[in-house]
Image (tube, rainbow, N blue to C red):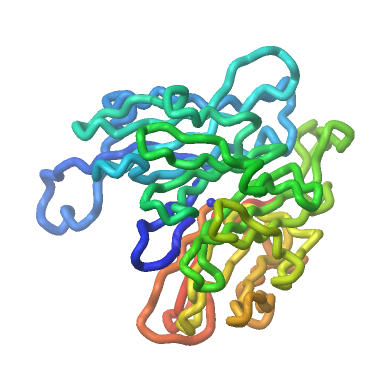
């Protein structure tokens, strides 16, 4: 579920829901074939041994099916990108260990898991992550979305992090939301400090329907079986704390089912807007009104992408591609400013 901050800061990289570590290999075919990228799976060679714990006991629930996130950034500023994996967890009291992993790039093709030494193992069933320098100290900090309270890890600059979630007031549960997914750092008011949007998925808990019957078989329930839950927009107070401005900014959506989010200035007016991909319902596109508020224009812009007669569009990884000419938003026309890479699923 990342990206798109000020030009004078490192790019913040988005979390995904699955990843394979790949490396390009040289092709021996004719020149025409060389134009097609070819890759080799070097996960084992790179010493990446991470395994996500889905944690199901029998038929998986919608939470256990949500899948893990991953985000990439050079957290120690050595010029080599590092990888943070989300570990899931055991929700059935069986004592099965699970934690997140931070693979530090050794600079020679291998990685070392330093999550414990760095102090970023996670504290719950993990779902997503995003890097961003929220305090302008030149070091990338880490925000982790979980089932329950989210986490904000402050980068201490010495290879370690400190959990500052409570101090910063950004655990994502302001409106009672527990099932968190995508998140994004972006400076929506252009004051030079990164703000934070933390998405909320469906309302799901121990007393919710755990499984459903699909074509005569027991399976996890689709998102349509559950109510949505609100996301939170946090404004950076420039002192290490944040304030919930969701309602004041005009983006309170109690029925949202956020999967992935992306911040981008889609209309080239110099202000970052916000695209929110929902599961089994229309997407939201929030236009920045330049006064610390947003206007939801998903339907009028053509980005809503949902109707009762179409396949649900689940945006697991949102990527905006910039074309030559401004205009309406579309994922299909050549005249579009942007298109979105979507993963589709028929519920």
Q: Nearer the viewer, residue 29 or 223?
A: 223
Inspect this view and state whether residue 342 appears: no
Q: How many marks?
A: 0
Q: Quadrant of residue 53?
A: top right
User: Would residue 214 be found to the left or right of residue 53 on screen?
Assistant: right
Residue at point 66%, 76% (across, down) = 293
Q: Quadrant of residue 151?
A: top right
Towards the viewer: 96 or 166: 166
Is residue 182 depicted above or below 205 in this figure?
Answer: below
Q: In the displayed structure, does residue 182 sit left or right of residue 120?
A: right
Front residue of 141/156: it is 156
Give the x, y percent position of residue 268.
Answer: 45, 82
Q: Is residue 75 visible?
A: yes
Seen in the image, is 80 located left or right of residue 55?
Answer: left
Outermost residue toward the top in this view: 95
Q: Is residue 93 above or below residue 176?
A: above
| Percent coordinates x, y for residue 59 in the rendering | 74, 26
| Residue 105 screen position, x and y as percent | 29, 34
Measured from the top left, where is residue 1 in percent x and y? 53, 51
Residue that protrudes farthest toward the front in the picture: 239
The quadrant where residue 80 appears: top left
**Looking at the image, which residue is at 72% across and 43% down?**
179
- Please tell me whether residue 202 is drawn above or below residue 113 in the rendered image: below
Q: Residue at x 33, y 40 (%)?
A: 76
Query: Would you say 160 lies left or right of 207 here?
Result: left
Q: Residue at x 77, y 64 (%)?
A: 253
């Amino acid at each position: 579920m990342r990206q798109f901050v000020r030009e004078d800061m490192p790019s913040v990289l988005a979390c995904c829901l699955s990843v394979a570590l790949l490396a390009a290999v040289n092709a021996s075919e004719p020149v025409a074939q060389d134009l097609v990228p070819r890759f080799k799976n070097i996960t084992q060679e790179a010493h990446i041994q991470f395994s996500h714990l889905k944690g199901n006991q029998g038929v998986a629930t919608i939470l256990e099916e949500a899948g893990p996130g991953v985000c990439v950034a050079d957290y120690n500023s050595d010029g080599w990108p590092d990888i943070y994996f989300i570990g899931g967890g055991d929700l059935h009291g069986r004592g099965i260990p699970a934690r997140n992993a931070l693979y530090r790039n050794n600079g020679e093709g291998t990685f070392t898991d330093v999550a414990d030494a760095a102090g970023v193992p996670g504290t719950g069933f993990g779902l997503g992550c995003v890097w961003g320098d929220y305090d302008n100290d030149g070091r990338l900090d880490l925000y982790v979305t979980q089932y329950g309270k989210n986490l904000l890890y402050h980068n201490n600059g010495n290879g370690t992090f400190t959990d500052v979630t409570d101090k910063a007031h950004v655990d994502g549960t302001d409106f009672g939301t527990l099932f968190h997914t995508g998140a994004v750092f972006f400076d929506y008011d252009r004051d030079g400090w990164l703000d934070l949007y933390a998405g909320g998925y469906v309302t799901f808990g121990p007393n919710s329907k755990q499984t459903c019957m699909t074509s005569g078989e027991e399976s996890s329930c689709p998102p349509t079986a559950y109510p949505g839950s609100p996301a939170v927009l946090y404004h950076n107070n420039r002192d290490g704390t944040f304030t919930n401005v969701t309602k004041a900014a005009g983006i309170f959506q109690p029925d949202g089912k956020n999967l992935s989010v992306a911040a981008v200035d889609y209309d080239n007016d110099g202000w970052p807007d916000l695209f929110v991909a929902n599961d089994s319902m229309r997407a939201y596109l929030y236009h920045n009104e330049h006064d610390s508020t947003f206007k939801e224009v998903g339907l009028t812009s053509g980005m809503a992408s949902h109707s009762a007669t179409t396949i649900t569009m689940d945006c697991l990884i949102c990527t905006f591609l910039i074309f030559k000419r401004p205009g309406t938003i579309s994922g299909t026309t050549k005249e579009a400013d942007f298109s979105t890479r979507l993963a589709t699923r028929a519920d």
